[in-house]
Amino acid sequence: MSTSTTLDRRIVARGLTRAFGTRTALHPTDLDLGPGGVIGLLGPNGSGKSTLLRMLVGLVRPDAGTALVAGAALQGDGTEIRRLCTYAPGELAVYGELRARDHLAWLLRGRAPGAHARAVALATDLGLPVDARVRTYSHGMKRQMLFAAALAPDVPVRILDEPTEGLDPTKRGTVLDLLAEDARRGTTVLLSSHHLGEVDRVCDRLVFLGAGRKIADETAEAVSQRARKLVRISYAANADLARIEAVLAAIPHTRVARDGVRFSVHLSEADPRAFLAALASAGSIPATVEYGQLSLQELYRELYGVEGC
Amino acid sequence: MGRENRFYLWGGLAYFVVLEALLVGAILFWPDFEDNAEALRDFLPAGPLMQSFDQIVAGGVAAYVHGQHFFKGCNTVGTLAAVILAMNAVAGEANRGTLEIWLARPVTRRRLLLERWLGGAAAVTLPVFATTLTIPWLLSRVDTEMALGPLMLGAVHQSLLLLAIYSATFLWSCLTSRPVFIVFGMLLFTVLQFAMYLIQVVTHWSIFRLADIDVYARIGATHALDWRICAPLVLVSAILVAISLVVFARRTP
């Protein structure tokens, strides 16, 4: 169990910026995360998620800005931060010639005694053959080995880049349960993911990145509220769409986007009854209505106009 | 034993075996060489190679051993070993995608790099010393003898040149993600340097002039290192390692 004080479990960043050549991977970004909880970092490919996570653990030097992770300032090569937090990379490259047990020991160099034994136990619980060479592992098994190494040390902060990528739904659920349990003990877990469905389950808070900029930073509940302000309706192909558009435009406190026979309607409040009543009174009854069932994937599409995985 | 050390251990052992095999063959050939030197000379072209041959004939067994072990064996096999042992230090990790997990542990980059440099440096230099130590015993097989002291000074000198070549390759490895470029680049450089050594008008521009029979003859005669060569070699290696540390500190996985 983590023993650090509450203040030592935060992730704070101010104006973190990084460019690669002429391309700005991350525009000045502020974060104030934790203490405790699971924070999801969401964004499409190339949005700057991995760059931000790598900067927070000192693997990529920021061009500007400061960061404080678990009470340690980001300076030099970031070793002080990496002593206080674990990191699981998104890139899945490992040493195939090593046995998993030895690979875990290699990954846990510099950690407190006992971390290796915990990692081996964790890997075994996850069903990994720890005495087999890693080259015999599948993609998902390698991912779980990196996860075991990241979860075993007793640290106040964990930073995980797509920890469930490539896992089957059962294993994904197990990994998320372990993260939720870890967060309940007070650890701050920052994870990135494309699998927006998993974020619903475990994250207390969501940070959205797009094109290297922070777009939103909200609690999961606030995001859920936002989802409840969205109604999707669709009509039959032979419907009078021009008339329907005119009807929708006339309903106050709404914002409408059309995609063929489907309309996405953003309401000003999380109660669709007035809107649906107005629609009915105008005689424009949709074929389907979707409300309150929007996954984050759909929300993501609505927010940023991009598809999640 | 860590995976890096295993690589250096096996690499160093393989290099030792090749070097020792060349040395055994050369020393067992010494009596024949001594008896047939005049006939062998007729096969050589005029120029630096014939001059080296004449130096060996004039210098006797000491010059022969220096020429065979240091000038021929260590300069060729040693350079190849230095390149192979250094090329993957960082570029190999980047190439296979493992640079990120290597750096993600709570260990300073300075320490990671110095450990790797030291492991490779040991694998490049220790076989030179180990094989040199066997020379007196091998010579006794052909009823000849040589003092170990000057031989070990020769091994120190040779090791400093190999360390400079190793450090240059190591720096290149810190700068790139393509080990294959390093291998071909360094091999091209080495072949070019040997070619230059054999051409009278440019022979003095070859780095192998720093470790040829002339140099080892001086070491043998004075029983001391030639610091006009050794000091710059040490300085060059130190500068290359310092630049490697600076480059590696800023490297992005």
Image (cartoon, rainbow, N blue to C red):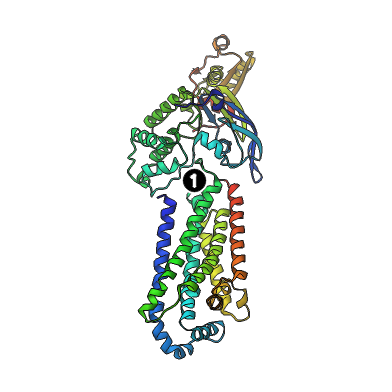
Compared with residue A296, is residue B65 higher up or lower down, i.e. above or below?
below
Task: Identify whether A300 is placed above or below B13.
Answer: above
Q: Nearer the viewer, residue A242 or A10?
A: A10
Residue plotted at (44% across, 70% down): B132
Horizontal and vertical percent position of residue A104: 40, 41
Query: Callout 1: residue from which chain?
Result: B
Does residue B120 lie above or below B230 as drawn? above
Camera-side residue of B156 and A184: B156
| Place of residue B81 in the rendered image (x, y in percent of width and height, measured from the top left) | 47, 64
Residue in front for this viewpoint, A12 or B138: B138
Specify whether B97 is left or right of B6. right
User: Residue A119 appears in which quarter of the rendering?
Assistant: top left
Which residue carries the number 1 mark? B102
Kindly tell me whether residue A260 is visible in this rendering: no
- Residue drawn at x 51%, y 58% as measured from the top left: B87
Q: Residues within 10 Å of mark 1 (few under 14, many from 20)?
A: some
Asked if residue A8 shows in the view, the reply is yes
Identify the image quadrant of the N terminus of chain A: top left
Task: Give the percent coordinates (x, y) of residue A38.
Answer: 50, 26
Residue A195 pos. (x, y %): 47, 31
Q: How many marks?
A: 1
Q: Secondary structure at mark 1?
A: helix
Q: Is residue A72 above or below residue A271?
A: below
Q: Quadrant of residue B244?
A: bottom right
Q: Residue at x 53, y 48 (%)?
A: B111
Seen at 35% across and 34% down, the residue is A121
Residue type, mark 1 in image: Trp
